[in-house]
Image: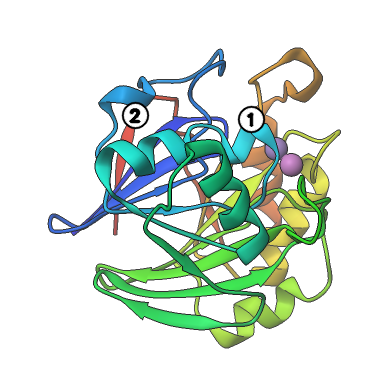
Amino acid sequence: MLKYTYYGHACFLLDDGAHKVLADPFLTGNPKAAIAAKDVSCDYILVSHAHGDHLGDAPDIAKRTEATIVAIPEVIGLCNEQAGAELKTHGMNLGGSVKLPFGKVRMTLALHSSGVAGGIACGFVIQMGGKTVYFAGDTALFHDMKLIGRKDSIDYALLPIGDNYTMGLEDAALAAQWLNAANVIPIHYDTWPVIEQDVKKYQELTESSTRAHVHIIQPGESLELK
Ligand code: NI
Ligand code: MN
């Protein structure tokens, strides 16, 4: 069984009962945060890029929990710098895969700026608990999403829908189609006024134009990924 818990913005936890994988833990200063950074427990932290609303509390959480940060080397460098310590880390880069105790992670393209020189923004395909989860990070719609969906059968796609900084509703619906995702969980919206969205409209748009089922998960809620 794989449980998804949404902590708000682009932060979520995947828990298979034996391992906990956290992503983009922007909690301090996040008006929608459903947990405090000091209360998070995890074994791995995936960081998609170095913008503050993604890297967030990763250095502090890694320092406290001894979780391993998985990110682009330049982002890892920034995490170590912010923590003032050598954290447990695993550096990788676009197109690479790695087997980790909980499963497998592939680092994918994202079309977005980086937040630290050289630290290209990325997404992740996560194989864990018998499921394949694609976390898009922050991204524009890009045509190679078709390749991501062709290489792996995506059970759940976590897609930003907030617009302004990332895809908006229509592009994120097209992303679901190009990924051929079975399920979509929208993220990265409603945190601030500039990314407020009608998530029901996204659900209607996506479910009427793709095979995907859209799950609207509020910060603090969990979903069993089936
Ligand atoms: Ni960003
Ligand atoms: Mn962002």
Q: Position of residue 215 (x, y in %)?
A: 47, 42
Residue 135, percent across and down? 55, 57
**Three-letter residue code for mark 1:** Val
Q: Nearer the viewer, residue 197 or 9?
A: 9
One can see residue 64 in this view: yes
In the foreground, 4 or 37: 37
Closer-to-camera residue (113/111): 113
Q: Quadrant of residue 71?
A: bottom right
Q: How is the image coloured?
A: rainbow
Residue 207 appears in the picture as rendered? no
- Mark number displayed over residue 221: 2
Apparent side of residue 58 relative to residue 43 in the rendered image (left or right): right
Q: Secondary structure at mark 2?
A: loop
Q: Which residue is mark 1?
A: 199
Inspect the image, locate mark 2, and give the three-letter code of the amino acid beneath it. Glu
How many numbered marks have been drawn onto this rendered protein structure? 2
Residue sticking out furthest to the bottom: 151
Query: Is residue 109 depicted above or below 95 in this figure?
Result: above
Q: Earlier in the sequence, mark 2 or mark 1?
A: 1
The N terminus - image quarter: bottom left
